Image (spheres, helix red, strand yellow):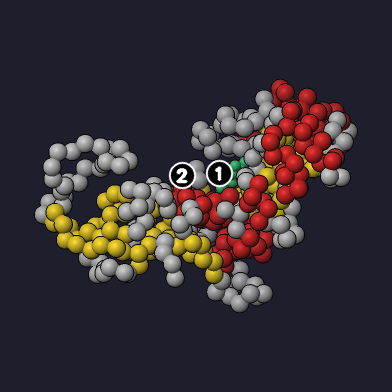
Amino acid sequence: MTAPRIGVDLDKIEQNTRVLVDRLAPVGIRVTGVTKAVLGSPGVAAAMLRGGAGGLGDSRVPNLDRLAGLGAVRTLIRSPMLSQVGRVVVVADVSLNTEAVVLAALDRAASLRGRTHGVILMIELGDLREGIAVDDAPAAVRAVLGHPSLRLVELGGNLACQNGIVPDDRNMGVLSRLVDAAEARHGIPLGTVSGGNSANIGWALTSDDVGRVDDLRLGEAVLLGVDPLHRTPIPGLHTDAFTLTAEVIEVAVKPARPWGDRAQAAFGEAPVRTGRGTVRQAVLALGHQDVALDGLRPPAGVTVLGMSSDHLVVDLGDHAVSVGDEMDFGVAYGALLRATTSPFVTTVEHRASPVGSTAPRP
Ligand SMILES: *Cc1c(COP(=O)(O)O)cnc(C)c1O
């Protein structure tokens, strides 16, 4: 098999989805499976759907295009580019929106194609990324209702992505009150509140009252089994659904410390090597073009010494490794995202259970 490659255990993705779907169902929250960290992989998306996800979300139009044919509602989870509205109404049933000019363009594009496009109006709740100011929400609701080819699906929020703001009863309550107010004012039942992302799970499972929130858009928790607020494992979930495999291209015993005058390295200041004596060093054919160093987890007993565009240097410790051998690494979110979107990294998806069977519920 080619290296580097990222292996995906689809059964683990399915099981992670199932556990989260089952935990959130009692509080009335459904799961939209987010595939942007895996380049909109239809295999991963299908695993999420088998695990009980109610729909699919991705931030990129080409990824949503790959998800056609799965029969699931597709949501574009980033505001459409004005230049892309024509494609958006084709590949997405629903999109997240904040701009009146985009809503007008989506309405025209949908009407031109004889379609109705669903809109989730995103509200700014304090994380200062996308979102309409709370005071401007009523006017935005009116604007959507005034567009014949748009359908107001829900209000939504997104926290913890830009400034790490934690979802709580206070900021989530703002969304619920806005929905109640909009329903009262316009006399229409507003479907739902798309409360947030993986960072909302802790809140959703501990809050006394999740209010009107009935959907979460979940990527990282499903894929990697961690709570992104503190990157701690979520009990009962697999944290090892993905494995990055790279090939060793040099093995040598080398001095622990570099010699000669020091200036900057390829990616700025190099970490200072402080060891003494010699190290058993390996170079792997893996670099910044393939994966992010941040979030790359070497096997136990192996230490990462540094990475440049195309070379990863590790201290092998006691590991017996030869040129041509492969080594497996774990990945956190940033490393996963880079690897699945790198043209140099092959993705290999596998299922232990035969296709068509249902995995045992963990
Ligand atoms: C990426 C993203 C998500 C999913 O976030 P995770 O932390 O991976 O669950 C949800 N909503 C929006 C708007 C996003 O951009």
- Which residue shows up at 67% across the image and 61% down it? 49
| Residue ID at (46%, 47%) | 334
- Whole-angstrom CA distance, mark 2 to mark 1, is 9 Å
Q: Of helix, strand and loop, which one carries label 2?
A: loop
Task: Say above or below: 232 vs 9.
Answer: above
**Residue behind mark 2:** 230
Is disc 2 in contact with disc 1, using a CB cutoff of under 8 Å? no
Determine whether, in the image, residue 162 is placed left or right of residue 26.
left
Q: Can residue 343 be seen in this view?
A: yes
Position in image of residue 110 (x %, y %): 81, 41
Q: Which of 157 and 260 is in front in this view?
A: 260
Q: Name the residue under label 1.
A: 199
Label 1 secondary element: helix
Q: Residues within 10 Å of mark 1 (few under 14, many from 20)?
A: many
Q: What residue type is labelled 1?
A: Ala
Left or right: residue 232 versus residue 145 is left
Q: Position of residue 228 (x, y in %)?
A: 50, 46
Q: In which quarter of the image is residue 156?
A: top right
Query: What residue is drawn where x is 80% and y is 39%?
Result: 109
Image position, residue 277 (x, y; %): 11, 54
Q: Position of residue 291 (x, y in %)?
A: 42, 52
From this viewpoint, which residue is outermost toward the bottom? 354
Compared to 99, does 71 lie above or below? below
> Residue 38 sits in which quadrant?
bottom right
Please give the label number shown on residue 118.
none
**Is the N terminus in the top left, top right, bottom left or bottom right quadrant?**
bottom left
Identify whether 219 is placed above or below 317. Answer: above
Amino acid beneath label 2: His
Is the residue 276 above or below the residue 170 in the image?
below
**Ligand 1 located in image quadrant:** top right
Q: The C terminus lies in which quarter of the figure?
A: bottom right
